[in-house]
Image (spheres, rainbow, N blue to C red):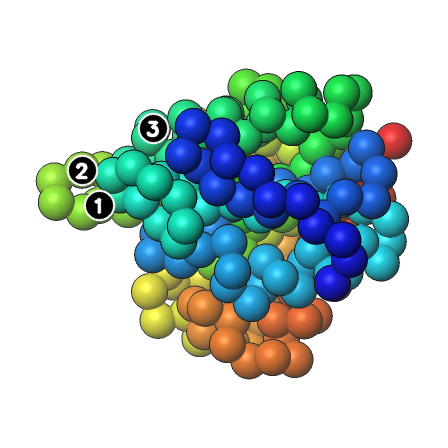
Amino acid sequence: MKESEKFNVNGIKGVVHYKSNKFIVCCHGLFSSKNSRKYMEIAEVANEKGISCMRFDFRGCGESDGKFSYKLEDRLKDLEEVMKYLARRYGSIKCALFGSSLGGMVAIKYAANREISSLAILATPYKFEIDNYVADITAEIEKCSHLLVMHGLKDELVPYKHAELIYRKAKEPKKILFFNTNHSFTDENERRRAINEAVKWIEKYFV
């Protein structure tokens, strides 16, 4: 792993692996953290391509302070804070998003109304319900383009029909890929293949 810089934005903690003004910002899943293997690996692959990478923990997850929340609105606020930090810290930058599961939903919600170079999502549902809370990003998906949708055919939590719907509703350019693995992409070869595909897609749309 290349030189890294830790940060703390109002209790939201993360790491930047800096290489250039082109950034991939990683959004982890519900109970995950920035130190999940997939985010460590995408930072490594991105840096090899001259792309910077930010990994951070949503509030109440990993090393970040605050109360844990599964609500998209709360996690979106956290992403907005770290994106503002990036702009303050590094000036004129270009950003793409990489999100897994709930993090993919947050990434789509953010990208629907903001300028993002591209986004890649992994094992992401278009809708989920928990404790009478319903999150549905169908409307936001229709506003997104430059989207790479990736999903495991053995996903035990989110059926791959979610990926098919997201892909169908998104605008061009878009791409969908399936992998022979589970929700967490624990198969090392399939995970590495997905990460390489994500970085390749994101690199293509950095201009």
| Residue 16 makes an appearance in the image | yes
Q: Residues within 10 Å of mark 1 (few under 14, many from 20)?
A: few
Tell me the amino acid under the disc marked 3: Glu
**Where does residue 63 sit, x and y in percent of width and height?**
41, 50
Using the rendered image of the protein, determine whether residue 153 is visible from the camera's viewpoint: no
**Which disc number belongs to residue 73?**
3
Q: Position of residue 179 (x, y in %)?
A: 58, 71
Q: Which image quarter is the N terminus in?
A: bottom right
Q: Secondary structure at mark 2?
A: strand
Give the class, few, some or many, for how many residues have Cα within 10 Å of label 2's Cα (few <14, many ≥20).
few
Which quadrant of the figure has residue 67? top left
Instruction: Using the image, determine if residue 90 lies above or below residue 197.
Output: above
Q: Amino acid at mark 1?
A: Glu
> Residue 191 location, x and y as percent?
61, 71
Which badge, 3 or 2, is on the more N-terminal residue? 3
Q: How far across and down, in percent of the image, does residue 198 sit?
A: 70, 55
Q: Secondary structure at mark 3?
A: helix
Per the rendering, the mark at residue 104 is none
Residue 133 disc label: 2
Residue at screen point 65% across, 33% down: 145
- The secondary structure type at the circle numbered 1 is strand
**Gap between marks 1 and 2 measured at Cα:** 6 Å
Which residue is painted at 76% across and 20% down in the image? Answer: 91
Decide: marks 1, 2 in contact (CB < 8 A)?
Answer: yes
Residue mark closest to the camera, 3 vs 2? 3
Q: Amino acid at mark 2?
A: Tyr
Q: Which residue is mark 1?
A: 129
For the residue pair 113 and 51, the one nearer the viewer reads as 51
